Image (cartoon, coloured by chain):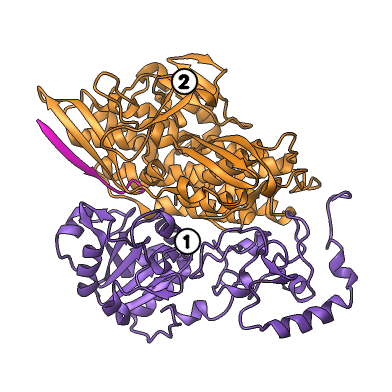
């Protein structure tokens, strides 16, 4: 059986998605089923300028990086190359938050910088006609498993259930908070009072965006071993349309209530629950689980 | 005669504008494009935001940018206290990043230039183990921000320490079974580099190809090296030929624009210096590399061996560090000053995979006023003039063909995204 032909096109990017993809554990199996007509790291029969100046065969077009009409590759505006291959390819996948929503590099100062179909959570009409072909994978960077699984689903012609940003619901229908090992502290409103501790939740004071960011970080672990929030780092919302919100390590509050509440939770519900949990103290959550040190 | 060569798969792209005279390259200009204006994005942001923004400079050396950032921010605070444990953990994760880079460079970049097939699986087997080891301490790889002003966010137990040790030993085994089939530590202490040529393995095979194609003296530059990022392994200083001087100061670094490129050139006291594994080995006086240098000077072959042989050196040293982590120490000590209200200037220098990386920050009343990032590739691939060639230009001028020049160019391990950031 012939392999699925992929073209990976980098626009305004840091190459982080290209490297994160390489961390897919069954890479050999993947490369037995898919081949890169072009990839920014993997060797290919065609050069980047071949891709830009010829019409090569392509089943799935992968786009990494934010898009601006001003931005060129091989002296050709990237939007022309995207448009050409978008029509040749059967499917388009936006790889990462920049290609999906504009991400970090929508701030780079290029004119009209956008994701393929969205600028943050607003529609961008530059490529409107391609919407029916597109699947979005957000993440800064993408999780390799999420990208590869999606490519297999496309290869196997599965009908993907997509959310309003065209992301497969299997990975984006729940929050990053789902599966975090600090959930008990969240439930009883115990913040992580200090960095560098196994204990505590970072939502209340340290800017953690996991309760209102959708993504699979705590369900499909990073590098198969860990996640930011498990490790003690607040979620920066890198899979979200709003990334980067900035002020990453502070929880913005109005009258003591977090500005952004857990996904789908209303202010009244939140306040009622907060009132109840504040009424009691659970000794176990006030103490370290255990400590190697006496004066932590 | 003029010729333009488009170079790709170097974490982005670059153009080499060659000028030939009498069938030899007599000048070459290096052009980078596609800047992302990271230094502008940082302006007027909270200082801590730099910890999340800066890893996004680069997909392959993001962690070096994180550690340089945290060091620059901490440098703005007098008497900041960082536990020995946090310092070790930062060093461990940064060493690991350097290691994955070198594996990728050898199997993905060098092999195709020597007429062999790129070996993605050999590149990624050890690199994925490295990424797991980093993620064990730092949450994920790439793009974490686990180092924060005051220490690190993680709180490892002996479970993580055992995992780390096992990952490192697995990576070392891969090296000894594939790259050089010998006891890696014995090899590094060996003072006769010809013994390396006689071993089996992927590195000696590439060396034999260089010998066969008469490329032992190709790619020499000024024999002038500099290292800014001191830690428990790398020594800071400069080395001209073999004369070492320890006193250097970041204030003498000068960044300047050059025509036809979006990358800024960099000099130290008005001279171009090479950074990277060969520079580090010259300062560290690593026996094997010293012997390579004695025989071949700063030729491309010395650069290749220095880079690959940094893998076992760093694995060995990182294992030593892991075995000396004192888990009773705190991971994080809250700084006496809130950086989100603070004013000050700071410099953070680290050794990244490709060489010295310097971050300079100015904070005023809790916001970033000014930020400068000087990357290793800027040092090596500065764009000098005909009468004052920069490091890689000097190494390419005099060669007969553009393809060979591309090999020499890539022996510096080019990172395009870092260069233009």
Residue ID for mark 1: A141
Judging from the image, what secondary structure is the residue with disc 2 in? Answer: helix
Rendered image: mark on residue B202: none
Q: Locate residue B295 relative to residue B289 in the image: left or right.
A: left
Boundaries of the magenta span = B1-11
- Residue A35 in the magenta stretch? The answer is no
Q: Which chain is orange?
A: B
Residue at screen point 48% across, 62% down: A140
Q: Give the letter of the chain under mark 2.
A: B
Mark 2, mark 1: which one is toward the viewer?
Answer: 1
Judging from the image, what secondary structure is the residue with disc 1 in? Answer: loop
**In which quarter of the view is residue A58 placed?**
bottom left
**In which quarter of the view is residue A215 placed?**
bottom right
In the picture, which quadrant includes the N terminus of chain B?
top left
Residue at screen point 19% across, 40% down: B5
Residue ID for mark 2: B290
Q: CA distance from mark 2 to mark 1?
A: 40 Å
Local crowd size for mark 2, using a 10 Å CA cut-off: few (<14), some (14–19), many (≥20):
many
Q: Which hue belongs to chain A? A: purple
Residue at screen point 48% across, 51% down: B41
In the rendered image, residue B199, in percent from the top left (x then y), is placed at: 41, 33
In the rendered image, residue B232, in percent from the top left (x then y), is placed at: 64, 32
Local crowd size for mark 1, using a 10 Å CA cut-off: few (<14), some (14–19), many (≥20):
many
Please state which of residues B121 and A94 is positioned toward the viewer in this rendering: A94
Please state which of residues B302 and B236 is positioned toward the viewer in this rendering: B236
């Amino acid at each position: 059986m012939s392999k699925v032909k992929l073209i990976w096109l980098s626009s305004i990017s840091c190459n982080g998605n290209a490297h994160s993809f390489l961390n897919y554990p069954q890479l050999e199996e993947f490369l037995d089923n898919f081949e890169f007509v072009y990839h920014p790291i993997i060797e290919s029969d065609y050069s980047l300028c071949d891709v830009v100046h010829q019409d090569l065969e392509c089943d799935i077009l992968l786009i990494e990086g934010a898009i601006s009409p001003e931005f060129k590759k091989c002296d050709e505006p990237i939007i022309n190359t995207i448009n050409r291959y978008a029509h040749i390819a059967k499917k388009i996948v936006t790889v990462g938050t920049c290609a999906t929503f504009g991400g970090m590099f929508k701030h780079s100062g290029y004119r009209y910088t956008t994701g393929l179909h969205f600028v943050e959570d607003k529609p961008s009409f530059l490529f409107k006609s391609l919407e029916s072909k597109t699947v979005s994978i957000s993440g800064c960077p993408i999780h390799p498993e999420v990208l590869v699984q999606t490519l297999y689903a496309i290869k196997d012609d599965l009908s993907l259930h997509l959310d309003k940003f065209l992301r497969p619901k299997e990975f984006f229908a729940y929050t990053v908070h789902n599966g975090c090992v600090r959930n008990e502290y969240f439930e009883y409103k115990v913040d992580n009072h200090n960095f560098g501790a196994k204990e505590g939740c970072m939502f209340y004071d340290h800017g953690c965006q996991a309760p209102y960011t959708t993504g699979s970080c705590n369900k499909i672990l990073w590098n198969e071993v860990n996640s930011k929030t498990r490790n003690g780092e607040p979620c920066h919302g890198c899979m979200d349309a709003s990334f980067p919100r900035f002020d990453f390590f502070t929880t913005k509050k109005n009258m003591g209530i977090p500005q952004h509440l857990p996904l789908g939770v209303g202010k009244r519900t939140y306040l009622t629950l907060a009132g109840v949990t504040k009424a009691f103290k659970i000794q176990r959550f006030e103490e370290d689980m255990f400590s190697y040190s006496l004066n932590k | 005669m003029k010729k333009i060569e488009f170079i790709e798969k170097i974490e982005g792209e670059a153009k080499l504008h060659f000028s030939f005279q009498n069938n030899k390259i007599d000048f070459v200009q290096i052009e980078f494009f596609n800047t992302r204006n990271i230094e502008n994005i940082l302006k007027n942001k909270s200082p801590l935001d730099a910890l999340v923004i800066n890893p996004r400079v680069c997909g392959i050396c993001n962690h070096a940018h994180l550690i340089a950032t945290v060091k620059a921010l901490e440098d703005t605070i007098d008497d900041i206290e960082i536990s020995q444990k946090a310092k070790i953990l930062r060093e461990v994760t940064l060493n690991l990043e350097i290691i994955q880079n070198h594996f990728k460079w050898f199997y993905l970049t060098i092999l195709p230039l020597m007429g062999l097939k790129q070996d993605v699986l050999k590149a990624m087997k050890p690199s994925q183990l490295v990424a797991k080891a980093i993620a064990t301490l730092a949450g994920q790889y790439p793009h974490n921000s686990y180092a924060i002003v005051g220490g690190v966010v993680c709180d490892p137990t002996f479970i993580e320490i055992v995992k780390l040790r096992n990952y490192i030993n697995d990576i070392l085994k891969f090296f000894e079974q594939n790259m050089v089939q010998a006891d890696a530590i014995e090899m590094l202490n060996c003072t006769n580099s010809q013994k390396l040529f006689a071993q089996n393995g992927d590195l000696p095979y590439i060396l034999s190809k260089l010998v066969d194609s008469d490329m032992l003296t190709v790619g020499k530059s000024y024999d002038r090296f500099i290292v800014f990022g001191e830690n428990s392994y790398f020594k800071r200083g400069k080395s001209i030929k073999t004369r070492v001087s320890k006193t250097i100061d970041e204030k003498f670094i000068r960044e300047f624009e050059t025509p036809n490129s979006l990358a800024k050139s960099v000099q130290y006291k008005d001279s171009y210096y090479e950074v990277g594994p060969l520079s580090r080995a010259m300062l560290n006086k690593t026996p094997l590399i010293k012997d390579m240098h004695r025989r071949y000077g700063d030729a491309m072959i010395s650069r290749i061996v220095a880079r690959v042989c940094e893998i076992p050196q760093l694995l060995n040293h990182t294992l030593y560090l892991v075995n000396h982590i004192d888990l009773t120490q705190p991971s994080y000590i809250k700084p006496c000053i809130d950086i989100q209200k603070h004013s000050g200037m700071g410099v953070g220098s680290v050794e990244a995979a490709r060489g010295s990386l310097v971050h300079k920050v100015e904070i005023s009343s809790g916001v970033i006023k000014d930020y400068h990032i000087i990357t290793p590739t800027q040092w090596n691939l500065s764009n000098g003039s005909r009468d004052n060639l920069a490091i890689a230009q000097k190494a390419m001028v005099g060669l007969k063909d553009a393809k060979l020049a591309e090999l020499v160019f890539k022996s510096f391990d080019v990172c395009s995204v870092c260069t233009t950031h």
